[in-house]
Image (cartoon, helix red, strand yellow):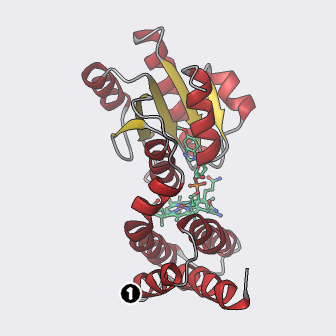
Amino acid sequence: MDSQNSNILIQISDLIISGNYKSISSVIEEALRTKITANEILSSGLLKGMEIVGIKFRDGLIFLPEVLMSAKAFKEAMKIIEPLLIQENSSDKIGNGKILLGTVKGDIHDIGKNLVGVMLKGNGFSVVDIGVDASIDKFVEAVEKENPDIIGLSAMLTTTMISMQKTVQILKEKFQTKLIIVGGAPVSQNFANKIGADGYGKNAIEAVELCKKLLRIN
Ligand code: B1M
């Protein structure tokens, strides 16, 4: 990558860190004009920036209002690159199956879940997203209405892992044969095994691979 491209990506990461949601769209447009791909913008710009936001927040260097602005900037950027990400990550397969996604009760983080949805769509899955802070009842109703092939639960807080566990337990009681996958920063393969989920995806790419594997799609 030439130095002009890496400068723009650093600029994008800095705009996420500073939560500059007003300027980010024009810089993303500029990056696309210089032929930087949406995947590069995501991984080397947006996600790099958000990682630093997380570290600064953890270390008490920034506070909730700043993190909210960073999240807003991330979402502004995603509005532009989402269709391109779907294109860049698309397989020629269509009609791979239906995935129901939601962030569990008590948790309002949705950037990671949304990204999982984008990558799934790019790989021919249809996605039904029930949003954040989703109660067990909301999951149950959505499963009854949508009859998805796989239910995907996201949790980003250590405190909401218990919500995830309860949701998986009730969904498994009600819909014995439905496949359930889980993910999110505090979640691990061990935790997934412990709560009886059928799979764990560390990131959006792994989530797609997992859905393909569970539904036996090559
Ligand atoms: Co919050 N937050 N936050 N936050 N936040 C974290 C998660 C935290 C790690 C920050 C920190 O301390 N370093 C920390 C959690 C600590 C813990 O519990 N271990 C934390 C905290 C404490 C909180 C609050 C409690 C703060 C407070 O109020 N005092 C509060 C909780 C609110 C609530 O949910 N009830 C809170 C609030 C917020 C904001 C609203 C300000 C905002 C969220 C905005 C939004 O999502 N719309 C926010 C943000 C932005 C973050 C950080 C900085 C970034 C999260 C993010 O979007 N990452 C985060 C720190 C961090 O993670 N580094 C943090 C980018 C995203 C693409 O990655 O979400 O990991 P990620 O998703 C990945 C994978 O996890 C995986 O794939 C995704 C894509 O690759 N994945 C799945 C996710 N879901 C999946 C599902 C799958 C498979 C894979 O299958 C179904």
Q: Amino acid at mark 1?
A: Lys
Question: Looking at this rendering, what residue extends furthest in the front direction?
Answer: 92
SS state under label 1: loop
User: Residue 137, located in which quarter of the rendered image?
Assistant: top left
Left or right of 91, for residue 158:
right
Question: x%, y% of residue 167?
Answer: 47, 27
**Residue at position x 63%, y 66% from top?**
43
Nearest the viewer among 73 and 94 is: 94
Query: x%, y% of residue 26?
Result: 42, 87
Q: Is residue 190 above or below residue 14?
A: above
Where residue 12 sits in the image (x, y, percent)? 56, 82
Mark 1 highlights which residue?
A: 22
- 190 versus 52 height, above or below: above
Q: Look at the image and tell me in which quarter the N terminus lies.
A: bottom right
Above or below for 39 versus 150: below
Say whether residue 165 is visible. Answer: no
On the image, which quarter does residue 13 sit in? bottom right
What residue is rendered at 48% in x and 42% in y? Answer: 120
The 10 Å Cα crowd at callout 1, few under 14, some 14 to 19, many 20 or more, is few
Front-most of residues 33 and 197: 33
19 with respect to 4 (left or right) = left
Residue 78 is at least partly visible in this image: yes
Q: Quadrant of residue 49?
A: bottom right
Q: Which quarter of the frame holds ligand 1?
A: bottom right
